[in-house]
Structure formats: C-alpha cells, structure tokens
Image: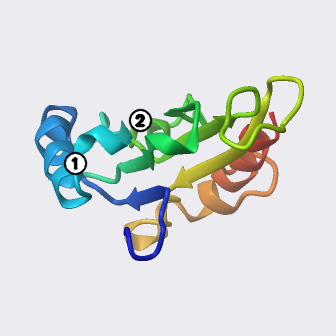
Amino acid sequence: VDEEGVDVLMLQETKLQESHVAEVEAALYEALGGGEAWRAAWACSTARKGYAGVSTLWRRRVGDAACRPLSVDPAHEADREGRALLWELSGASAAGGGGGGGGPRLKLINVYVPNSGADLQRLEYRTDRAAGWDARFRAAIAA
C-alpha cells in the first residue's frame, strides 16, 4: 500500500458482523503501518450473518473526508446486506484547496453489487430497467 501510494482502500465481501469490526479494523491498521494514519468505515450485513459487507479505509492526510452507508433500496433486504459506502472528500478543507463552494470535491462509492443468487432468484430484481437494483443504484448516486 505504501509502495503504491494508496490513499483510499476499498474492500468488498468482508463478511463481518458489527461485533467483529473493532478486532479486524485493529489488525488492518497494524498491517497498514498504524491506525494513527488511517480512518475506516464499515457496512455490515444485518440481514444475514457472515454475508456481503464493505469497508473503506483512507489516510487522514487526504484531508477532511467522511464516509457513510449509501442506501439503494430501503424496502429490499439487499439494503441491509452492507453493500455500499459513500466516501466524500470535502472541497472546503481538502489538501490542495480548490473545490469551491464547500461541497464535496470528490465522491467515491464502494459497492458490492448483489448477484443474481442461487437459481437466479434475484435476476429480475437486479436487471429490471425501471425498478431493479441497478436502476435504483443509478438513482441513488445521481441524488
């Protein structure tokens, strides 16, 4: 990570329960050279244990950044599977200035897209052009 100059690291399919985050986060910080240089956000599945999940880690040096879960379809169980985090780097206080207006200078989305499932149970939900997960994801990121 240091050799490549990585400032933001996004992990998918973490399969953690919220009760395991602190332990895994500490181990990640240690592997990355120390927690004082990094921050992390987690989205864990509350629909199923040991399922899906994403994590976004970023170096504190990048500036004023925040990360939060991104809701795609609140009425569907996929929204409770820890599938998406929205990371925003502030334009007002980010290193290097710029950005203007104080709005986000950069947004990154860490997403673990639901697959169609066993026997293609979720295929229609995923691909329906008007109301499927893909269409709802496009709407969520456009908002």
**53 and 136: which one is in front?**
53
Residue 130 pos. (x, y %)? 81, 49
Give the residue displayed 77% in from the left and 37% down from the top.
97
Colour approach in the figure: rainbow
Measuring from the top left, give residue 73's x and y in whole percent.
60, 36
Q: Residue furthest front?
A: 96
Q: Does residue 44 appear in this view?
A: no
SS of the residue under disc 1: loop
In the picture, measured across the screen, residue 100 lies left or right of residue 50, that is right
Q: Pointer 1: residues within 10 angstroms few (<14), some, or many (20+)?
A: few
Residue drawn where x is 49% and y is 65% of the image: 115
What whole-number distance in Å separates the C-alpha atoms at marks 2 and 1?
31 Å
Residue 111 in picture, x, y percent from top left: 53, 54
| Residue holding disc 2 | 80
Q: Secondary structure at mark 2?
A: helix
The amino acid type found where label 1 is placed reads Gly
Count of numbered circles on the image: 2
User: In the image, what residue occupies the spot 36% across and 44% down?
Assistant: 38
Q: Is residue 16 above or below residue 74?
A: below
Q: Nearer the viewer, residue 6 or 122?
A: 6
- In the picture, measured across the screen, residue 58 lies left or right of residue 118, that is right
Question: Badge 2: few (under 14), some or many (20 or more) residues near its Cα, within 10 Å?
Answer: many
**Is 38 drawn above or below residue 90 in the view shown?**
below
Numbered mark located on residue 34 in the image? 1
Amino acid carrying label 2: it is Arg
- Give the mark nearest the N terminus, 2 or 1: 1
Q: Position of residue 119 (x, y in %)?
A: 41, 72
Q: Is residue 121 visible?
A: yes
Which disc number belongs to residue 128? none
Q: Quadrant of the C terminus?
A: top right
Relative placement, left or right, of 112 versus 25 is: right
Corner quadrant of residue 45: top left
